[in-house]
Amino acid sequence: MDAAFTEEQDEIRRTLRALLDKRCGPDEVRAAVRTPAGYDEALWRQLAEQLGLPGLALPAAYGGAGCDPTELALACEETGRAVLPAPLIGTAVLAAPLILALGGERRRAELLPALAAGRSTAALVVPGGQLGTALALTGPNDGNWAGGGRAGGIQARWSQGHGGGAPGRRPGELPPQGGGEPRAGGGWRLYGEAEQVLGGHTADVLVVAAHAGGFARSRTLLFTVRAKGPDGAEAPGLLRTRQTAMDETRPQARIELRDVDAELLGEDPSGGDGATDAVAAALAATGATAAACLAAEAVGAADAALSRTVGYVKERTQFGRPIGSFQAVQHRLADLYVAVQAARSAAYYAAWAAGGGRAVPEPGAGALALAQALEALRAVAAEAVQLHGGIGFTWEHAAHLYFKRAACDELLLGPVHRLRARAAEQAGLFASGGGDGADAGALVGPAVRAAVGA
C-alpha cells in the first residue's frame, strides 16, 4: 500500500474543504436541517455540478468521475469535518453501487446519470433495522435478515396482470426462469414497511430489500421503486414520513409500501439462487466501501471537534493562565490526537482494501476501521463537551453536533462490539483449529491483527 496521496486526491480534499468552509458552518448546518428536505439543496447541487461529488465513484460512462473508494472516502472525511447534512451516504455510498452492480445496462443508463449529476437522489431501504447485517458488517447477510418471509418486513409478489402470462400460475408466485420482462399490467409489487431509512423521505429512487417466493421459497432480493413520478407526485401506495432523529444532520424516514410497483434489480427475472447470491455479494461489497466511507467521515468529524477544542483551551483562562497549559488537559488531548490518527490510518487502509488493493480480500477491514473511528469520535466528542465547560452543553455551540453524530453513527451500522465480532468471525479467529479456520488465520491482514492485539 502506498500511503502517499496523489495530486488529484489532494486536490479533491482541498477543493471540497474550501467550499464547505464557506458554505457549511454550524449556523448553516442548523438552518439546513430545519428545511423539509433536511439539507441545503442549493449546496448539494453546487457540490454535484462543480465537484461531481455524487458521481465520484461511478464510471464515466454514466456521468461519474470513475474514481476508487479511496477518493470517495477522502470526500466523506471532508463532509464529516463540516458535519454536512446531505444525501451523499444514501445516494453515492449505499444505493448507487448496488444499481451499478446489479442493474444491468438498461437500468444503469436509466438511473445512474441522474444520480451522478445530482438531479436525483436514492436511498437503500432495509426493514427491521438490519442495515449492518444486510451489508455483512455485523452478521452474515445470507439468512433471513429482511423479515424471514413471515409477517413484518417487506414482501414482494409477482402480479400477473392482464398480459396473458403462463396459465395456471397463481398471483404471488415467482415468474418462471427465463420469464423475461413483466408483461403489460403485471410485474412485481411490494408490501411492508421499514423504519430509519437514511434520506428516504426525499429520495427519488428507492432500492428496497424484500422477500419473495412466500415462506417455502423465501429469498431476499433487491428492487427499485420510482418514488416520484414525472410530475413530482408520490408513487401510488407509497407513504413516507420523516422521523425525529437525535442527529438531525442524518434525516431518516419511515417507509410504507402498500402494493407499490417495483422492478427487480438483477438479470434473473425469476429471482433464483443465482440472483440471491449476486444480491448477497453486491451488498457485502457495498458494505466494505460504506464502512470505509463512514469511518473516514467519523475521522473528519473527530478531527474537527479536536481542533475546535484545542483552539478553545488555548484561549480559555483559569487561575490566570490558559487551561491548555495544564498537564492534565494536555495529556487528555494528546490521547485523543493519537486515537484520531490511528483511526484515520485504519480508514484509509479500509478504503484501499475495498478498492481491490489487497490481492487476498480482507472483508473485516472495513468493519474494524469503522469500529475504531466510531470509538475515536465518541471519545473526542465527549471530551470536547467537557473541556468547553458550560458552553459546550448549549445548543448554540457546535460541540453538540459532533456529540450527536457520534451517538447516532454507532446505531447506523454498529454497534462497535458487533462490528469487531463479525470481523473476527470472518477472519476465523474463533475457529477450533484446523480446516478453514486455521487457513483463514494466516490471511488476517494488519487491520485485523492490530484490532485484536495479535
Image (cartoon, grey):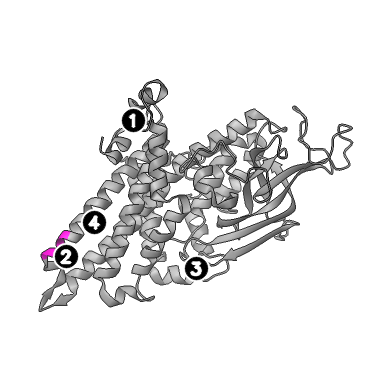
Mark 4 lies on a secondary structure that is helix
Separation of residues labelled 4 and 2 (CA atoms): 11 Å
Say if 282 sits above or below 156 in the image.
Answer: above
Residue found at x 69% / y 52%: 192
Residue wearing tag 4: 336
Quadrant of the rendering where the C terminus is positioned: top left
Residue wearing tag 1: 444
Helix, strand or loop: magenta stretch: helix
Extreme-front residue of the structure: 432
Separation of residues labelled 3 and 1 (CA atoms): 42 Å
Tags 2 and 1 touching, CB below 8 Å: no
The quarter holding residue 253 reads bottom right
Q: Nearer the viewer, residue 387 or 84?
A: 387
Tell me the number on the disc at residue 375.
none
Mark 4 or 2 closer to N-term?
Answer: 2
Separation of residues labelled 2 and 1 (CA atoms): 37 Å
Mark 3 lies on a secondary structure that is helix
Residue 104 percent coordinates (x, y): 64, 34
Residue wearing tag 3: 33
Residue 185 lies in the magenta-colored region: no
Tell me the number on the disc at residue 329.
2
Q: Amino acid at mark 2?
A: Val
Mark 2 or 1 closer to N-term?
Answer: 2
Residue found at x 50% / y 49%: 54
Mark 3 or 1 closer to N-term?
Answer: 3
Please provide the residue range marked out in magenta. 327-331
Residue found at x 29% / y 60%: 380
Is residue 127 left or right of 171 when viewed as pictured?
Answer: left
